[in-house]
Amino acid sequence: MYEGAVQDLIDELGRLPGVGPKSAQRIAFHLLSADETDVRRLAHVLVQVKERVKFCEICGNVSEETQCRICRDPRRDLALICVVEEAKDVVAIERTREFRGRYHVLGGAISPIEGIGPDELRIRELMQRLASGEVTEIILATDPNLEGEATATYLSRLLRPMGLRVTRLASGLPVGGDLEYADEVTLGRAFEGRRSIDD
């Protein structure tokens, strides 16, 4: 335990996701020894993010304007929507340069243990986007974990009666991985998603 402001800083840093007590302490002492200009710049950027960044009114992605750059891009395919859990997932998919449609950010995944049900996610907004009838395919790109699977299952049951093509991202073995280290679910998915070598 440290005194006053130092302990307050460690406590606040420790509240960040993925930052444990040791990491919080290490970051705090780094900031204490850093140049005052660097610390002020960091504080300024944190305040700016909270003041300027909002969520896109269409898809829920982060943006400094009312609509994100992807939703403003007229070259994007309006018939395709890729549903993701968080805005950081949009960045991951964009890096592949494989998807040319638009996104819908749910803001999380269904997790009864954490008290997150369908009403806490941006599912109502997704349904409103589909009302226009221009969307023909929904790609469910939720995480391949228990919560992501529950969310994908819920959404697929909700969307199928609408006559849309509902697809799920394939999952399986990572490139460079060893079969002996793959868990049963991953290996099972790899078998389900197998394709011809001629493809």
Image (cartoon, grey):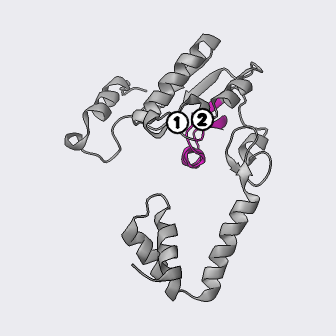
Q: Is residue 112 above or below residue 161?
A: below
Is residue 83 shown in magenta? yes
Which of 18 and 95 lies nearest the eye of the viewer? 18
Q: Residue at x 35, y 26 (%)?
A: 194
Q: Is residue 146 left or right of residue 99?
A: left
In 3D space, how far apart are the residues under numbered discs 1 and 2 (Cα atoms)?
6 Å
Q: Is residue 133 above or below residue 173?
A: above
Asked if the residues shown at circle 1 and circle 2 are in contact, with their CB atoms under 8 angstroms apart, the answer is yes
Mark 2 residue type: Glu
**Would residue 169 be visible to someone looking at this image?**
yes
Q: Which residue is mark 1?
A: 116
Q: Which residue is mark 2?
A: 120
Q: Is residue 106 left or right of residue 143?
A: right
- Label 2: few (<14), some (14–19) or many (≥20) C-alpha neighbours in 10 Å: some
- Quarter of the image with the C terminus is top left
Q: Which residues are magenta?
A: 81-107
Give the x, y percent position of residue 43: 65, 74
Q: Is residue 126 above or below residue 41?
A: above
